[in-house]
Image (cartoon, helix red, strand yellow):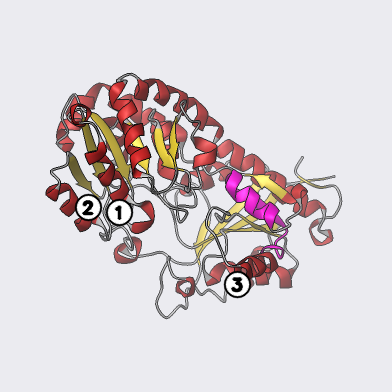
Amino acid sequence: MICRRLGLVAIETHPIQYKAPLFRRLALDPRLDLAVLYAMLPDAAQQGAGFGVPFEWDVPLRDGYRSEVLENRAKHPSVTAFSGCDTPGIEERLRVLRPDAVLVNGWVVKTCLQALWACKRLGIPCLVRGEANLLRPRAWWKHALHRMLIRQYDAWLAIGSANREFYRFHDCPEERIFWTPYAVDNDFFAAQAAVRAGRRAEIRAGFGLPPEATVFLFAGKIEAKKRPLDLLEAFPLLPTDLRAKAHLLIAGDGPLHDACEQVARERNLPVSFAGFLNQSRLPDAYAAADVLVLPSDAGETWGLVVNEAMASGRPAVVSRAAGCCADLVVAGETGQAFDLGNVPALAEILAEYLRNPGLAASQGLAASRHVQSFCFERIATGILAGVSACVRSNPICGGEGAGPC
């Protein structure tokens, strides 16, 4: 057996607030030698695409781990368009770094495919950690293209059960699918919730929320795939006596902001708009709320706000079309699920929380326990297992028996 650290290069479009703490955790693992290659560093306007406001994250994103930024030759640099990340120099960097394996973040931009083909030419195993699932219907030819592409990788890291089923559907070998559940920094959100527990009334007042209301929270981009209007449409369906106890806090910005404000104004709904909240302010929204609601369609391939809310001790009401629903929502225990677009069903779920004032708190405790298994430790274990499996079967990397001690 070769006892050494395994070199891993992770390929990302840009620094992401959800990924930075994970990379810090991986950098501390004595079994891995991690480097992260970014396709670009977005400016405030590029970062704010879809959020409705230019911004820069107010938490450090590149501290605590080794990273580089590749030369992006895209004519119109972007982290959201396939052609927005074009880094032909990636092959030379991999030739120099010569890692045992490369981990790519799906196939969402050109850089991801450039990394895959570079690995093929250099004889480096390439693992993929994408978000795709089967919750959204696709034409047969798209499945055919997916199967052709996906089988080019050497291992597949599943972010959840729906994503794992996607790989199985496309005939990926079961022994090469590894469990790396999507996660946030649970410890951070739990600690922030504890710090704010005694300031709930003050925080609510800052958002303009009634002190005794049951507050439902929508957090994220106010865009079509998240279906915020479904939540607004549910409020008028509440019985009159219960509606007086309810309030909606919308934390975010985006293309549907004005439409949501108009509906709230025209129907005189109890809604407060907090606008975009940066990472350091998000815990305030969870502290002020009782229940998170995510009505998203299948374009929501996961929904990390659900992880955040549960780590903060809040249950979640989630559409079954969202990728995280099957894994995070245990109906009646950590929250509730409803069929996409079924506004009356959503309204009935909201009413149940209003009828039972202690329900949100009890489910919140269960949610905080449940989400602990969706953590960086599980991801690190899955990544290491995937890299080790690839290295053992790759003669260039050491062959049979190679891997960490």
Give the residue at x 84% y 60%. 395
Crowdedness near tag 2: few (<14), some (14–19) or many (≥20) residues, C-alpha within 10 Å: many
Q: Dot 3: within a 10 Å radius of its alpha carbon, few (fewer than 14), some, or many (20 or more) residues?
A: some
The local secondary structure at tag 3 comes to helix
Q: How many marks?
A: 3
User: Marks 3 and 2, how far apart in space?
Assistant: 40 Å
Q: Residue at 51%, 75% (x, y): give it.
A: 86
- x and y percentages locating residue 108 in the rendered image: 52, 65
Q: Quadrant of residue 90?
A: bottom right
Name which residue type carries label 3: Gln
Is 162 inside the magenta-drawn segment? yes
Frontmost residue, 92 versus 384 = 384
Identified by mark 1, the residue type is: Ile
Q: Kindly tell me whether residue 280 is visible in this rendering.
A: no
Q: Which residue is mark 3?
A: 114
Q: Secondary structure at mark 2?
A: helix
Q: Is residue 238 visible?
A: yes
Name the residue carrying label 1.
222
Left or right, 126 with reference to 343? right
**Disc 1: CA contacts within 10 A as few (<14), some (14-19) or many (>=20):** many
Report the disc number at residue 116. none
Residue with the mark numbered 2: 260
